[in-house]
């Protein structure tokens, strides 16, 4: 149940209302942005809600129970603060969104209608459509640990304990050729074995993509350096001379953890867990079933 202030309740009960919608968006990097469908900017809670920024929303529907309530936000890139390349780079992924119903004559009279996170974003030539997911969608996300063969830690995190800052774990290169804005030929990586950086993370240190990057799909050695292919094209144009850093990759398998990183003691998977064939098998005469290791 929503709590409406007496002032807003009186305004809603009147014959004429001066209402508008405001959207407050909080990105993962902490940047806060505000937009409104009113014809003038509004300010409350220290946030300026920009008018005519190109946002429109579908009808807001709520249901009882734990079903996920969704709506769509559609818009064009009309605001100077909405950068298509930042959207492509994932800076708006899972951003927090608040939708307010506001009396634009008295912004202190407002009501929070919906709170959630941005979901799937579809981009076009001149605009986008973003799905706004309700808070209940978090209940659909896996939590805790899963019993599986592969490791569920991220390479270099507190559970993994591999030092990605070590010289053997990190390389620095300079782009000398570019194909399709995702395949780069680079110098500076000649000391690393082929495939060392596959599934690793590449981040540009300068140029148009400074601070952005992506996951490495392929790392091949060449006589003069290396070829590094990203899974997705960079958000902005990669130029010859751009420098970058790239970290070693991990396929989450126990043999890789032990041989490549010498980190078998911290492996967070279950490589000796019986598979489906064992579960559906039956005992045979002569089998040893003493509860001991199968390896």
Image (cartoon, grey):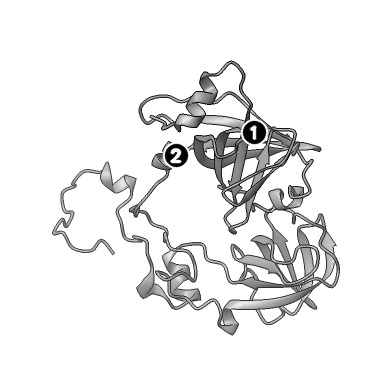
Q: Nearer the viewer, residue 197 or 239?
A: 239
> Residue visible at 58% across and 23% down?
59
Q: Which quadrant of the rendered structure holds the C terminus? A: bottom left
CB under 8 Å between callouts 2 and 1? no
Quick check: 127 above or below 198?
Answer: above
Q: Label 2's element?
A: helix
Q: Nearer the viewer, residue 60 or 288?
A: 60
Q: Nearer the viewer, residue 153 or 289?
A: 153
Q: Position of residue 135 (x, y in %)?
A: 44, 39
Instruction: Please state which of the two labelled residues, at mark 2 or mark 1, is closer to the viewer.
Output: 1
Q: Label 1's element?
A: loop
Quick check: 153 above or below 186?
Answer: above
Determine which of the numbered discs, if any, sits on residue 105 in the image. Answer: 1
Q: Which quadrant of the rendered structure holds the N terminus? A: top left
- Crowd tier of the residue under label 1, counting other residues whose Cα lies within 10 Å: few below 14, some 14–19, many 20 or above: few
Residue furthest out toward the left: 290
Q: Is residue 215 left or right of residue 278?
A: right
Q: Position of residue 218 (x, y in %)?
A: 67, 62
Report if residue 271 is visible in the image: yes
Which quarter of the picture shows residue 138?
top left
Q: Nearer the viewer, residue 196 or 107?
A: 107
Which quarter of the picture shows residue 291?
bottom left
* Upstream in sequence: badge 2 or badge 1: 1
Report if residue 124 is visible in the image: no
> Residue visible at 37% across and 64% down?
268
Q: Position of residue 257 (x, y in %)?
A: 45, 70
Q: Is residue 269 left or right of residue 173?
A: left
- Crowd tier of the residue under label 2, counting other residues whose Cα lies within 10 Å: few below 14, some 14–19, many 20 or above: some
Give the residue pinned by disc 2.
135
Residue furthest out toward the top: 15
């Amino acid at each position: 149940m929503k709590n409406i202030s007496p002032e807003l309740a009186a305004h809603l009960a009147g014959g004429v209302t001066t209402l508008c919608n405001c959207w407050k968006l909080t990105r993962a990097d902490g940047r806060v942005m505000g937009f409104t469908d009113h014809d003038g900017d509004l300010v409350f809670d220290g946030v300026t809600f920009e008018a005519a920024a190109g946002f429109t929303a579908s009808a807001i529907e709520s249901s009882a129970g734990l079903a996920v309530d969704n709506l769509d936000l559609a818009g064009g890139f009309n605001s100077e603060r909405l950068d298509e390349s930042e959207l492509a780079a994932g800076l708006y992924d899972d951003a927090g969104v608040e939708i307010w119903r506001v009396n634009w004559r008295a912004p202190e009279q407002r009501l929070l209608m919906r709170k959630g996170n941005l979901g799937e974003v579809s981009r076009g030539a001149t605009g986008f459509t973003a799905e706004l997911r309700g808070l209940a969608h978090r209940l659909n996300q896996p939590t805790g640990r899963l019993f599986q063969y592969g490791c569920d830690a991220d390479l270099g995190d507190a559970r993994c304990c591999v030092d990605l800052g070590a010289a053997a774990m990190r390389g620095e290169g300079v782009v000398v050729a570019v194909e399709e804005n995702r395949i780069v030929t680079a110098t500076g990586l000649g000391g690393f074995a082929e495939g060392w950086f596959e599934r690793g993370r590449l981040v540009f240190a300068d140029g148009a993509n400074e601070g952005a990057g992506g996951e490495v799909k392929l790392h091949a050695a060449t006589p003069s350096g290396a070829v590094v292919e990203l899974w997705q094209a960079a958000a902005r144009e990669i130029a010859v001379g751009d420098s970058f850093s790239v970290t070693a990759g991990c396929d989450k398998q126990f043999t890789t953890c032990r041989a490549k990183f010498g980190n078998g003691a911290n492996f967070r998977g279950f490589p000796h867990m019986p598979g489906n064939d064992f579960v559906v098998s039956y005992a045979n005469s002569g089998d040893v079933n003493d509860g001991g290791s199968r390896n």
